[in-house]
Amino acid sequence: MTQSQLDRTVSRRTGEPLAVIRRLGFQARSGRPDDLEAEDLHLAVDCPFCGGGVALSASPGGPPPLAGCGGCDVEFEFAAADVYAAGPGPGRRPHRRVHAA
């Protein structure tokens, strides 16, 4: 993927103007970041309150109906579209600030 392709993709996905994306300087990462094996991965979702990654427990019937954030001491529902594969630890996505409506 070229830098131009990356910038256009981020612009389309975020809705931000291409000039803003270019100024922010997004860069593609080369290779696998942690050289993980399949058994190192688990399912996770982001906490809607703090934005931290929350590991989902594995069970034969699929993920549980609620996820629990230890940092916020709260359980919350999540959509299947919110689930992602994460490496070792609770989740691999960076924390983001969540604004209350």
Image: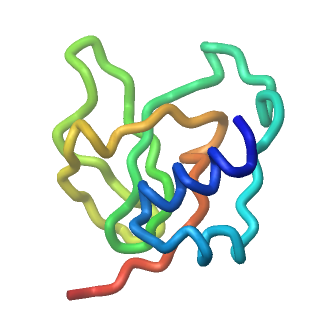
Q: Residue at x 20, y 16 (%)?
A: 61
Q: Nearer the viewer, residue 56 or 25?
A: 25
- The correct choice, above or below, for 11 with respect to 49 in the image is above
Q: Quadrant of residue 82?
A: top left
Q: Nearer the viewer, residue 19 or 75?
A: 19
Q: What percent of the width, then of the height, locates residue 73? A: 36, 68
Quarter that holds the N terminus: top right
Q: Quadrant of residue 18?
A: bottom right
Q: Is residue 95 left or right of residue 33?
A: left
Q: Is residue 78 left or right of residue 18?
A: left
Q: Is residue 96 left or right of residue 31?
A: left
Q: Residue at x 31, y 19 (%)?
A: 59
How is the model colour-coded? rainbow
Figure label count: 0
- The correct choice, above or below, for 71 with respect to 84 in the image is below
Q: Nearer the viewer, residue 44 or 15?
A: 15
- The correct choice, above or below, for 30 with respect to 9 in the image is above
Q: Residue at x 23, y 37 (%)?
A: 80
Q: What percent of the width, then of the height, locates residue 93? A: 57, 53
- The correct choice, above or below, for 87 with respect to 6 in the image is above
Q: Is residue 12 left or right of residue 92?
A: left
Q: What percent of the width, then of the height, locates residue 98? A: 39, 78
Quarter that holds the C terminus: bottom left
